[in-house]
Image (spheres, helix red, strand yellow):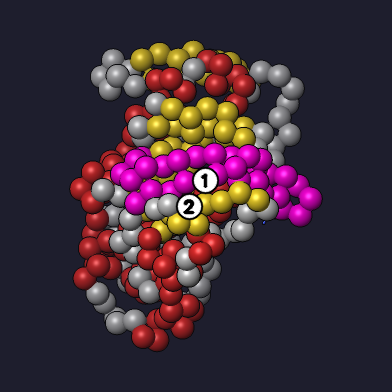
Amino acid sequence: MSIEVRDLTFSYGGDRILSGVDLTVGSGDFVALVGMNGSGKSTLLKLMAGLLAPASGTVLLDGRPLTELPRRAVARRVAVLHQSLPPVPGLTVRQLVLQGRYPSRGPLGMLWAPDRDRRTEEALELTGATHLADRLLDTLSGGERQRTRLALAVAQRTGILLLDEPTAHLDVRHQLEVLTLVRELRAAKGLTVVAVLHELDHAARFAERIVALHEGTVHADGPPARVVTPELLTRVFAVSGRVVTDEVHGTPRCLIDHAVGEKQNLRM
Ligand SMILES: Nc1ncnc2c1ncn2[C@@H]1O[C@H](COP(=O)(O)OP(=O)(O)OP(=O)(O)O)[C@@H](O)[C@H]1O
């Protein structure tokens, strides 16, 4: 499944966040979305999932405008891994993932959902969360919550996965495992993936394309070796650094030296 963003503009109240954003993600692509804190990455993912409405511009799902598709049809095609889990007291990991399997049924979906189903169990297993299945959400560590978020997205079996910081809170090993899993899912099931990643080295190693957002627009869009440059580090991330080629993986790696310019006013 493909997803296309055309000339998208979005503001929260009077604050313009995105202007004239164009982005085409073809079926089976793995795109990493990068940019500084507050550059609009999560907002763009929400617009791509139809969870926010653009001020102008269009999002097309397999060539059809999102606005022409019923919410249920979008939910069957697009799963979003949000930055946080919904704060639902008393819910276990398995119950949450099950509930996510029935997004079109709304908050009362659990009343109709079975206690277990095969896809939920598979998603828990794939994401290494089976041992967490009976734990209450509010007792999980950051990394465990992250696995649960991923299981929730994977269980929906959509053609498109939009992942907002899938590696946040994970230790180095689990970061690699999650990104490898996403890459494998994509290869095995032909999923289309857009993932917000802060770690540029990971973006370069796991995605085929990197899209860098800066000041509300797409600053760069292309293969990692073309996008990850010292100029990107300076212009988009306000740091000075060198970019070398990883001898083993053949992908760019950043060696950051220091911050440049004035102290950043973090938009968080
Ligand atoms: N619901 C909201 N209401 C008002 N402003 C918002 C809202 N959500 C986000 N913003 C603002 O919009 C801008 C973009 O936010 P967004 O979360 O899309 O950035 P991001 O690139 O994902 O950031 P980060 O890397 O910190 O997660 C920020 O300045 C943020 O404060």
Residue 54 sits above or below residue 251 on the image: below
Q: Is residue 226 magenta?
A: no
Residue 253, position in %: x, y? Answer: 41, 20
Q: Residue under circle 2?
A: 60
Whether the residues at callouts 1 and 2 have beta carbons within 8 Å, the answer is yes
Amino acid type shown at disc 2? Leu
Q: Which of the two residues, 43 or 248, is positioned nearer the viewer here? A: 43
- Identity of the residue drawn at 50% across and 75% down: 89
Q: Quadrant of residue 231?
A: top right
- Identity of the residue drawn at 47% across and 23% down: 227
Residue 256, position in %: x, y? Answer: 52, 19
Region of the chain picked out in magenta, as a range: 1-30
Residue 157 sits above or below residue 105 on the image: above
Q: Which of the two residues, 211 or 34, is positioned nearer the viewer here? A: 211
Q: How packed is label 2: few (under 14 Cα within 10 Å), some, or many (20 or more)?
A: some
Amino acid type shown at disc 1? Val
Q: Is residue 19 magenta?
A: yes
